[in-house]
Amino acid sequence: MDWPTTIATTVAALLTLAVFSFLYKDNPFYKFAEHLMVGVSAGYWVIILWYTVVIPKMWQPLEAGKWYYIIPIILGILMWARLNRKWQWVSRYPLAFYIGVSTGVAIPLEMKAKVIEQLNGSVDLVTTMYATQASGMTVVNNILILIGIIAALIYFFFSKAHTGATGSIAKFGIGVLMVGFGASFGFTVMARISLLIERLQFLLFEWLKWG
Amino acid sequence: MKRQLPLIIIFVCGIFMVFQYFIPHENSEFIYEFAALDWPPIIGVFALTLGIISLVRVSATKISKRDEDWQYSIVTLLGLAAMIIAGLPWFGGQTSPAVKWQFDFIMRPIIATIFSLLSFFIASAAYRAFRARSVLASILLISAVIVMIRFMPLGPFTDIVSRTADWVLNVPNLAAKRAIIIGVGLGIISTALKVVLGVERSYLGRD
């Protein structure tokens, strides 16, 4: 390994060890890595947004004569009013535009992607079952999925007290949700362990050259 | 003026963007392209500069007042300056070797290690969450364990564990995830409506 690569790998390894040192307790090495991370990440976002927003979405349209792109720039400059206590209320205008547009766009899109399409997929489970003459196990599974979705949704429905039949269905719904949470937890653990293994492999095989 | 005008702007922009979605006309798509795709990120860039100014101001104040751990603020400022300088057009911009070096040998190791640290803390969280004190906690425990041991070689049990895990993921887990997505979607829509109609105003702050 050449010297520049050795130095770079050593820097990465020392930073890795500095973060791992937090397992003992909060200490100067961890604080160093943590603060370095904050600075470098902020700088990285500056670079990314400069080359993906400022140049293509601000500079180039203005150069091309699209004068109306001056409006978001003025709105953006109004955001800086936040720095002055007396004038910080002015920053509400760009914020209002941002929130208004974002929520306006979100309402139909979320309705389509998260509600209609998901309901469509759930109903499709039953309708395609007849069309494709699915096997016994598939039929059982599809019905179970549909019942699970309805039960879990009833658990989320708080306009009616969870007593009697509603309560029983909601209880089954919690069980279904617990399976989902358990699966998510399992996946999270596996992802974190994979990262840990990768970091240990880096320290042992890439940095220390063991094995 | 201070509170009413922002509420009017939100209402007009919000309602306009909702209706715009249902108007299949090229002018409508044109407005969507600049008002929804281009303008919000531009305002976001100015908001980011606010964040950077705030970071520099807090760090500089800490250093000048010699507050507790002020030395680390120097590290933050040096990291920030090093990355921004490395990304200047004269050094090659966002694809410059210096940016790549800092990303590969500073950012990536620290981020990956911080996330891998969670595997230690998740163990204690798991102990608390998974103590099989009730039927629901037991279901959570069984589901998580099945997912975790899915790819493990378990001799004669490998096949049955793998099949059980697939069933858990494809049937009850699918139902749960779908119900959660529908619930989240309805939640987002109701919150968005509350914002557009001026019922939810916490984002305006006080005054």
Image (cartoon, grey):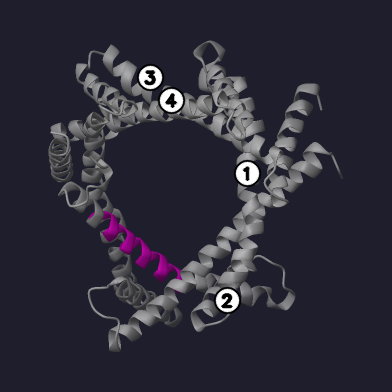
Q: What number is the disc on residue B142? A: 2
Checking the image for residue A124, the label placed there is: none
The residue carrying pointer 3 sits among few (fewer than 14), some (14 to 19) or many (20 or more) residues within 10 Å by Cα, namely: few
Give the residue type that dot 3 points to. Answer: Ile
In space, the residues marked 2 and 3 are separated at their CA atoms by 52 Å
Circles 4 and 2, Cβ within 8 Å, touching? The answer is: no
Share a chain, discs 1 and 2? yes
Query: What chain is tagged by disc 4?
Result: B
Secondary structure at numbered mark 4 = helix
Q: Which of marks 4 and 2 is in front?
A: 4
Residue labelled with disc 1: B112
Q: Which of marks 1 and 4 is nearer the N terminus?
A: 4
Can you see residue B171? Answer: no
Task: State which tag comes first along the sequence, 1 or 2.
Answer: 1
Closest to the observer, B122 or A114: B122
Amino acid at circle 4: Ile
Which residue is the site of mark 3? A55
Q: Give the range drawn in magenta.
A: B171-189
Q: Is residue A91 left or right of residue B3?
A: right
